[in-house]
Image: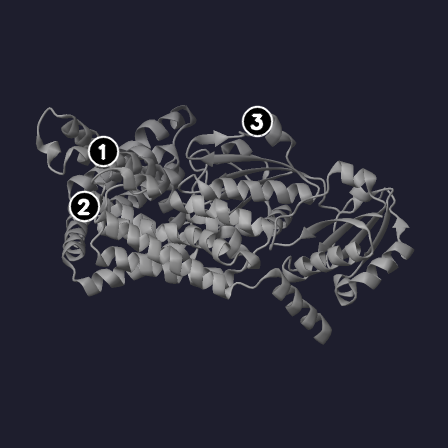
Amino acid sequence: MKTLIVTACPSGMASSYMAARLLRQAAEELGWQATVECHSQLEPVIPFTQAQLDEAELVVVAAGTELDLSRFAGKPLYKSDIQQALNNPKAWLQQAAGQAVKQQGSAPAAAAGVRLVAITACPTGVAHTFMSAEALNETAKAMGHQIKVETQGSVGAQNALTAEDIAAADCVIVAADIEVNLSRFDGKRVYRTSTGQALKKPKITIETALAEAKMYQHQGQSSAAQDGQDDKKQAGPYQHLLTGVSFMLPMVVAGGLIIALSFVFGIEAFKEEGSLAAALMQIGGASAFALMIPVLSGYIAYSIADRPGIAPGMIGGMLASSLGAGFLGGIISGFLAGYAARYLARNIPMPKSLESLKPILIIPLFASLFTGLVMIYIVGGPVAGIMNTMTDFLNNMGSANAVLLGIIIGAMMCFDMGGPVNKAAYAFSVGLLASETYGPMAAAMAAGMVPALGMGIATFLARRKFNTNEQEAGKASFVLGLCFISEGAIPFAARDPLRVIPSCMIGGALAGALSMLFGAKLLAPHGGIFVLFIPNAIQQLLWYVLAIAVGSLVTGVLYSVLKRSDAEMLAAGQQAAAKA
């Protein structure tokens, strides 16, 4: 008998996962041809194909939550609570075969079949952007919804939403860790969340969006505010900072790699005027790195006040750079300029005939004056002193302090794998590059490679404990780890956070500590293994490779020991069901 089995529990976790395996095994014992659709965060949801739906002779649903069953219209269907299926899977299937009732073409659930559009965007525009888009796509389709997701990644917008897509949408989901332009969604129901939430809990994200999305009204000067309301979903200071970091990052990566290329000709080769090394240093150091702080400041202000904030923000950032206030000064000037521009946009009354002058004359002029004067006379000097003190401390600290700093950076990089804590450690390390402090950046990249590499190693060392999907995910994770993309470990962390995250943090802290202890220095803030092949881009190269290898191996070994196989999880589930 060709049977379709659907399992779903209220939490979307273990019960659904265990029921899927128990029912599949029981169906095989009965000689049935069974295909399972498991609604669980422990594995990707693979919806039935149209061919499977057409050929099905029986549909059984073990669910502790409401599901849209309209796609099974015309098929014999049996549905009961998931706990009954767990107690005696074989008897439950036999009962289902005898009591199944042909499903009528009933209307789907109230929230089913809606049209969704979404945007995903993370600060680096690499892993989280595309992984969260994929999660939303798969989950929405499994829920019976239509969805189109635009990814605003490092290469620009892909799968861009058209005016027709937006007009037809019932709800807009904005899963972004940076500020994005929402003006095109004026008059639509919009729900804002993070890429991490959309990636780890896509079903909850979609359900919450349909229930809580609010009508968006674009105010012209700020894409983040809705009529000045105090909305808890509105972008806050941290998101403004990440927006600045997002726009700054390509500048720093390009500049750092070009500086590293100049060292191919020798550490001192750039001092020879007219040489290629000198030209590369001029491009990377004197140009790209010189723009780093103004771009950071300008786009923090842009996130707060939209386009009118860019000019005062960049002017403030340039002043921070020239005054020696470094990246801390750039952050302060960005917030000063952004909030000043937003205040002027909202509170300066102008005749309608002159309203068009506000964004191109009034706001840039007065916000730039305010930001510049505050930076020169109040903020610049003290912050420059703080930066000099911090730089001197970092460049001259003893081995014990260096190891402690490496442990902190390494643990932060591995705590949430691309989340807020990871981004904070990374932004701190990148910011220090402007003051020619390269040790923390080396520790950050070493630790950031550990989670994904460690998961790949674990699937190799303890192959029997991982199912086929996890083994394939381990191979992809290892490749992502080599590229310094921590997010490769997220599928493992989502399934088993209490074992994966501590394992990664221990290995990352060790890698960061060893990197700082060995005195490794990294000039390029990204690139992973590819940076290793650029001569002189990394100081203490062999020791640095050892730090990454040791940290990754420790993570892999730890998780391979702690990991519970499907059989162990199944046995634990059966014991829990028996006790219940």
Picture colour scheme: one colour
Give the Cα distance between marks 2 and 1. Answer: 19 Å
Label 1 belongs to which residue?
A: 261
Q: Residue 26 sits in which quadrant? A: bottom right
Location of residue 226 in the rendering, given as x and y in whole percent from the top left corner: 50, 42
Q: Residue furthest left?
A: 272
Q: Amino acid at mark 3?
A: Thr
Label 3 belongs to which residue?
A: 162
Could you tell me which secondary element the residue under label 3 belongs to? loop
Label 2 belongs to which residue?
A: 435
Location of residue 36 in the rendering, given as x and y in whole percent from the top left corner: 72, 50
Could you tell me which secondary element the residue under label 1 belongs to? helix
Structural crowding at the residue carrying mark 2, measured as other residues with C-alpha within 10 Å and reported as few (<14), some (14–19) or many (≥20): some
Location of residue 222 in the rendering, given as x and y in whole percent from the top left corner: 43, 38
Q: Earlier in the sequence, mark 1 or mark 3?
A: 3
* Quadrant where the image shows the C terminus: bottom right
Location of residue 534 in the rendering, given as x and y in whole percent from the top left corner: 25, 37
- Seen in the picture, residue 472 relative to 164 is either above or below; the reply is below
Q: Amino acid at mark 1?
A: Leu
* Residue shown at 71% from the left, 42% from the top: 144
Answer left or right for 401 relative to 14.
left
